[in-house]
Image (cartoon, coloured by chain):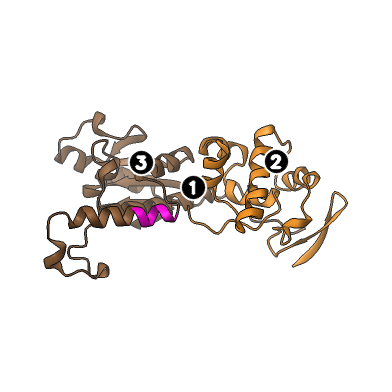
């Protein structure tokens, strides 16, 4: 557990770097978090996924899996793997300021 | 700041051999396969013997689970053998899996393929049962021998189901 300053905001993160208090997240943090993991520009589709992940965590209390993001946003599995290469579930959670997903599917 | 392990240069490889054609074992292989692709791990599935049912167009939507000779289901074999019990167990299992947001088998395997997973079919099984390419799910990449599969699996981790 540590406190970091990004885009002028203080955020609490766990040992891996995932934010531990999603209420500290604001949209201007997302591009900075994305850059930190190699995603340089956020397109509308990126935002669609990120906003869903953040709000879904707020409503459900757990981070959505890739499948849930796909079903709920209409973005296909293929698109999500293109937008957030290799590890879409964890990357979306990281950028959206929520814990990494715990679901298997 | 600390960053999660998003190492994109990972050369990890997981290769799953599915040898059983029942719903539960197919689901187990898909869960591991899906976990692998979502971790950015190269993933190969090799379907052999009854496991081929999971990639046969005519059978893949009708995989079943039977309580017969399955002590974990807690049903006496004499009861499990009654006609209709397998269908009932299958529909109960499907319901339980849907509650966990597990997709239907066809959607699940499609999802694994969309995420970059590779499907291979065992040549011996394919020849033995007289199948043609048209019998196979469209995402199957090739029909290969066990030794071809082992070549693909070199330096990978093999899981036999």
- Whether labels 3 and 2 belong to a single chain: the reply is no
Query: In the picture shown, does residue B15 fall above or below B73?
Result: above
Residue on which the image places disc 3: B106
Rounded to the nearest angstrom, the CA distance separating label 1 from label 3 is 17 Å
Secondary structure at badge 1 equals: helix
Magenta stretch bounds: B95-100
Q: Position of residue B20 (x, y in %)?
A: 25, 53
At numbered mark 3, what does the secondary structure look like: helix, strand or loop? helix
The answer to whether mark 3 and mark 2 are in CB contact below 8 A is no
| Image hue for chain A | orange
Looking at the image, which residue is at 28% across and 39% down?
A: B144
For disc 1, the neighbor class at 10 Å (few under 14, some 14 to 19, many from 20) is many
Overall secondary structure of the magenta stretch? helix
Confirm whether residue B161 shows in the render: no
Q: Quadrant of residue A86?
A: top right
Q: Chain of mark 1?
A: B
Looking at the colours in the rendered structure, which chain would you say is drawn in brown?
A: B
The reply to whether callout 2 and callout 1 are in contact (CB within 8 Å) is no
Q: Position of residue B134 (x, y in %)?
A: 25, 29
The residue under the point 21% across, 52% down is B87
Q: Position of residue A51 (x, y in %)?
A: 68, 43
Q: Which residue is mark 2?
A: A39
Question: Where, quadrant-wise, is the N terminus of chain A in this rendering?
Answer: bottom right
């Amino acid at each position: 557990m540590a406190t970091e300053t990004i885009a002028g905001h203080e955020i609490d993160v766990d040992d891996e770097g995932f934010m531990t208090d999603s209420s500290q997240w604001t949209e201007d943090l997302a591009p900075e978090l994305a850059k930190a993991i190699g995603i340089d520009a956020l397109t509308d589709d990126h935002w669609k996924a990120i906003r869903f992940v953040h709000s879904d965590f707020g409503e459900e209390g757990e981070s959505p899996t890739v499948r849930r993001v796909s079903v709920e946003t209409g973005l296909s599995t293929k698109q999500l793997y293109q937008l957030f290469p290799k590890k879409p579930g964890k990357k979306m959670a990281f950028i959206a300021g929520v814990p990494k997903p715990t679901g298997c599917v | 700041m600390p960053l999660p392990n998003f190492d994109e240069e990972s050369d990890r490889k997981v290769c799953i051999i599915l040898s059983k054609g029942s719903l539960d074992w197919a689901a187990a292989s898909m869960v591991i396969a899906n976990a692998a692709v979502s971790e950015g791990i190269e993933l190969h599935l090799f379907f052999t013997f009854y496991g081929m049912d999971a990639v046969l167009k005519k059978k893949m939507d009708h995989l079943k689970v039977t309580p017969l000779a399955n002590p974990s289901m807690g049903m006496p074999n004499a009861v499990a053998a009654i006609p209709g019990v397998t269908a009932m167990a299958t529909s109960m299992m499907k319901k339980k899996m849907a509650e966990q947001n597990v997709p239907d088998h066809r959607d699940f395997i499609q999802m694994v393929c969309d995420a970059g997973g590779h499907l291979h079919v065992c040549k011996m099984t394919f020849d033995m049962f007289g199948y043609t390419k048209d019998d196979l799910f469209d995402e199957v990449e090739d029909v290969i021998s066990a030794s071809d599969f082992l070549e693909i699996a070199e330096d990978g981790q093999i899981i036999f189901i």
